[in-house]
Structure formats: structure tokens, C-alpha cells
């Protein structure tokens, strides 16, 4: 009896896995692969949601994330290998997250970021869960990237504060500043597509409540605000360091001009003496 209960419990659980794969996906190209090559059934075109069995679905988002519903590990790797051909700027490392959908007669509000109780897995539920989970792993990627960008600027800023000098070559420091500014630009683009999805307005009040609850449980808004604050620090620090570099270059040019003037005067004087 116990073994039967365990099997029943496993059958009523849908395991969800999300990956942040790249900066962007070419959704029309991905759709063609999922529909024509892998024979999936299209449920939504943007974000892309394709069904392969009643509980097996794949969601692909234009900001570079993939969400798998009830897909085994080996098959997930095969999907990613096929679909990463249609990415822009594939990530060196993938941010990922796990989630569990429990099918139960009564729904329950999420009490954390690990699982959710729903009556069934349908298109609307998959879109809401996929949207929140995909955004969470995308935000996680940028959390790591922004932390790295801050670390890149921490040492030169600290050195400027303590000694008034920049401890690196201009080329190396310019590369670090460029990296920080690139993070700022890409993050601004990604967050621009994080508006409430259409399903929130089209799916009725239960879907809207589910979306709000999940977004709150994953702390998406607070995490995004923290990233934006850090990016603002990066931007100000970058501007400050660049101004110091330009100031140092101007000072060097001024000394060169002064030396040239002195040299010219000396030549004139020596010429008259001769």
C-alpha cells in the first residue's frame, strides 16, 4: 500500500526546470524546430509554449530562458543543444532553478519558491509558472554579472580613495569600465521586456492572483530594484574613473606642451648664444 501511495504521489507531481541560456532567442526559428522537427503542438507563440504530451511542455522566452515541464534530464540536454543554435550571445554558465507542480483537488497559495499546488497543468498555468520562473533565472544571471562588474571596479576605486592613483594600465581599466557599461546596457534591455504578460489580463482573476503570488514569492521586484541600484553605482563609478583617466591624459598632454615650449625656448637661447 505504501509503495502504491508513493507511485501515486510521484504521478501527481510535475517537475519544472528553468535555464537562462543566452541573451536572446530567435523565437520563429525555435518554433519551427519544436513544431516541425520535434512534432510539438503550439499553445502560444510569444512567449513560445509547445506541448508534447498532456504534462510535457517546453516554454522558450525571447530574453534567452527555457522552462521544461515534465522533461527528463537527458532530453533537456538534447533540447538545449538543438535550440542554442538560435541564440544570441550564449551564456558561459547557465543559471537554473527547480520547481514542482503538485496536482491536487484543492489549490494552495505558494508558501515558497519550491512548489505550487494546482488542480491541473494547462496552458494558462504553464505560461504563468514559466514566465515567473524564466524571469527568476534571468534575474539570477544578472545578479551574478552585476556582482562581477562591481568587483571589477572595487580595487581601482579603493586605490583612488586611499592613494589618489589608478593602479592599472589605462587599457586594462578601460576594459573593466567597458564591461561594467555593457552590463548596464544589456540589463536595461532585458528588464524592458519584464512587463506583466498578456496571460495576466486574459486569464481572469485566478490567473492574475497566481501570477502576483508567484512573483512575490520569488521576490522579483525587489531583486530587480537591487540590481538597478547596483547598476547605478557601477555607472557612477565608471563615469568617475573615466573622468580620472581623461584628467590624467590631459595633465600628461599639458606637461608635454610645457616641455616642448621650454625646449623651444632653450633652442632659441642657445642659438643666440652661438
Image (cartoon, grey):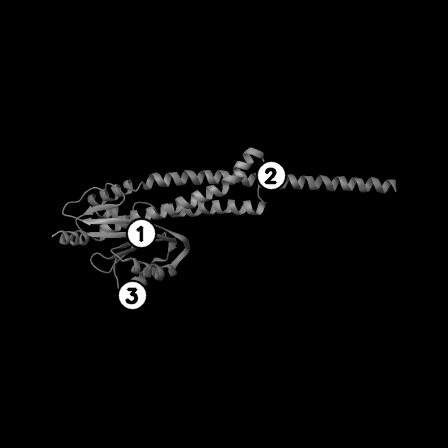
241 and 32: which is toward the camera? 241
Q: Quadrant of residue 248?
A: top right
Q: CA distance from mark 3 to mark 1?
A: 23 Å
Q: Quadrant of the C terminus?
A: top right
Q: Position of residue 182 (x, y in %)?
A: 47, 47
Q: CA distance from mark 2 to mark 3?
A: 59 Å
Q: Secondary structure at mark 1?
A: strand
> Residue farthest to the front?
2
Q: Position of residue 253 (x, y in %)?
A: 66, 42
Asked whether disc 2 touches disc 1, contact meaning CB atoms under 8 Å apart, the reply is no
Residue at position x 56%, y 39% in the image: 243
Residue at position x 40%, y 47% in the image: 189
Callout 1 crowding tier (Cα within 10 Å): few <14, some 14–19, many ≥20: many
Callout 3 crowding tier (Cα within 10 Å): few <14, some 14–19, many ≥20: few
Residue at position x 28%, y 50% in the image: 130
Question: What residue did someone put label 2 on?
Answer: 247
Q: Is residue 81 above or below residue 171?
A: below
Question: What residue did someone put label 3 on?
Answer: 36
238 and 200: which is toward the camera? 238
Question: What residue did someone put label 1 on?
Answer: 18
Q: CA distance from mark 2 to mark 1?
A: 47 Å
Front position among marks 2 and 1: 1
80 and 188: which is toward the camera? 80
> Which comes sooner in the sequence, label 3 or label 1?
1
* Residue 44 in view, yes or no: no
Q: Secondary structure at mark 2?
A: helix
Amino acid at each position: 500500500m505504501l509503495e502504491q501511495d508513493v507511485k501515486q504521489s510521484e504521478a501527481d507531481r510535475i517537475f519544472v526546470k528553468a535555464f537562462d541560456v543566452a541573451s536572446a532567442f530567435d523565437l520563429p526559428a525555435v518554433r519551427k524546430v519544436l513544431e516541425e522537427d520535434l512534432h510539438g503542438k503550439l499553445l502560444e507563440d510569444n512567449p513560445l509554449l509547445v506541448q508534447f504530451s498532456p504534462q510535457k511542455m517546453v516554454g522558450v522566452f525571447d530574453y534567452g530562458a527555457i522552462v521544461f515541464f515534465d522533461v527528463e534530464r537527458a532530453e533537456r540536454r538534447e533540447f538545449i543543444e538543438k535550440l542554442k543554435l538560435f541564440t544570441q550571445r550564449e551564456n558561459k554558465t547557465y543559471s537554473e532553478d527547480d520547481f514542482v507542480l503538485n496536482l491536487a483537488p484543492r489549490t494552495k497559495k505558494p508558501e515558497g519558491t519550491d512548489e505550487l499546488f494546482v488542480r491541473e497543468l494547462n496552458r494558462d498555468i504553464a505560461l504563468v509558472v514559466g514566465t515567473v520562473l524564466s524571469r527568476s533565472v534571468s534575474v539570477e544571471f544578472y545578479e551574478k554579472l552585476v556582482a562581477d562588474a562591481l568587483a571589477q571596479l572595487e580595487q581601482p576605486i579603493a586605490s583612488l580613495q586611499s592613494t589618489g592613483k589608478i593602479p592599472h594600465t589605462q587599457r586594462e581599466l578601460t576594459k573593466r569600465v567597458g564591461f561594467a557599461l555593457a552590463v548596464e546596457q544589456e540589463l536595461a534591455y532585458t528588464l524592458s521586456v519584464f512587463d506583466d504578460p498578456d496571460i495576466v489580463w486574459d486569464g481572469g482573476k485566478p490567473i492574475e492572483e497566481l501570477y502576483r503570488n508567484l512573483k512575490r514569492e520569488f521576490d522579483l521586484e525587489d531583486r530587480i530594484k537591487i540590481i538597478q541600484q547596483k547598476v547605478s553605482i557601477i555607472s557612477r563609478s565608471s563615469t568617475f574613473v573615466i573622468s580620472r583617466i581623461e584628467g590624467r591624459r590631459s595633465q600628461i598632454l599639458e606637461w608635454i606642451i610645457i616641455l616642448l615650449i621650454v625646449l623651444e625656448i632653450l633652442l632659441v637661447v642657445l642659438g643666440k648664444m652661438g
